[in-house]
Amino acid sequence: GFRKWTAKDFVKLGKVMGQTDVMIAYTVRDPFTMLMSVWGETVKNGRTRSFPEYAAKQLKDPQKSEPLNPLAELGPILDHPKLRLSVLDYEAVRAKKQDIYTAFCRDILGLEGMQPSRDKPKNYSFPIELTDYLRALSKKIEHDPKKSDMLFSRLFTACHKPEDIERIVATMKTVGADLRETVKLDRSAPWYSDLQADLVARLGPRLHPLPVDGRLFGHGVIEAVTYDMDRLAEQPEIDKLLEDSANRLKAGRVPWTKSPVMRAWRHIQRTLGF
């Protein structure tokens, strides 16, 4: 995706499209909610690391962590003379109960009053029960994301009906009631305050909306709840569900790399020289 592109890649894309003025639109989020979101995406891709393990690794050096420090991504763009940057404050947009599409059109494109044509969010967020279940399932079938031709979560949903998924989530909640773990993420940590101040200082008028009190994010402690899947997967009810899911995935593998979408994307990559 675009998150892995370098500043030079964006300049190259501008040249291909005949544009010398390239504006990068970016949405900045609370580092801790971003941390949880990125971890969830790694699981959707087939990774099996638990959230406590993932969070501990990122918190060893927050300044060098891409999920925690937006400047790890934005720094090279800010420093490039041929790129401009405009940043949406996601927390402010959400606090005002605005749609991110409406905010993007207004603050980035200068188009007032734009509304999304559909209400249902396209990017469905999995509940923690399903995310941890996917971790256990990926481990059970020894899934290798590097060798997969389809996103693991898409393969899973393609092989399970909505009622199957509802049953999995309900069973996880019931059987795993005593196997929950809580990870506390403290916004009063010194590095958190320093990062917030650094973001406001470096982004300045590029931020939309401008922070009134110099704060981009909330305060207090976030408690992230997850499950001890090593123990939960041993429970008969969960083990049975995992076995059923494993059999479905083996029978329902989809050749995603041969799809028209992937062929079109590879053509774009070759055209741009990536």
Image: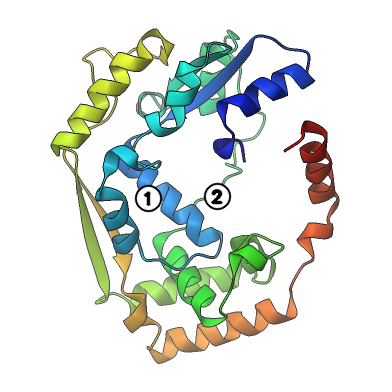
Task: Report, in whole angstroms, how far the alpha carbon at label 2 lies from the one at label 1.
Answer: 15 Å
User: On the picture, is 149 further left or further right than 162?
Assistant: right
Classify 7 as above or below 213: below
Residue at 60%, 12% (x, y): give it.
109
Residue 220 lies, in percent from the top left, at: 16, 39
Residue 269 lies, in percent from the top left, at: 77, 39
How many C-alpha atoms fall within 10 Å of the one at disc 1: few (<14), some, or many (≥20)?
Answer: some
Can I make out residue 202 in this image?
A: yes
Picture disc at residue 226: none
How are the residues colored? rainbow
- Nearest the eye: 73 or 235: 73
User: On the picture, is 112 further left or further right than 133?
Assistant: right
Counting the numbered discs, the total is 2
Q: Amino acid at mark 2?
A: Tyr
Picture disc at residue 36: 1
Can I make out residue 98 in this image?
A: no
Q: Secondary structure at mark 2?
A: loop
Q: Amino acid at mark 1?
A: Met
Q: Quadrant of residue 89?
A: top left
Q: Secondary structure at mark 1?
A: helix
Residue 163 lies, in percent from the top left, at: 59, 70
Q: Quadrant of residue 196?
A: top left
- The residue positioned farthest toward the bottom in the image shown: 236
Residue 25 lies, in percent from the top left, at: 54, 22
- Nearest the eye: 172 or 272: 272
Q: Quadrant of residue 112?
A: top right
Q: Which tag, 2 or 1, sits closer to the chain's start? A: 1
How many C-alpha atoms fall within 10 Å of the one at disc 2: few (<14), some, or many (≥20)?
Answer: few
Residue at 77%, 32% (x, y): give it.
272
Q: State the residue position of label 2.
A: 124
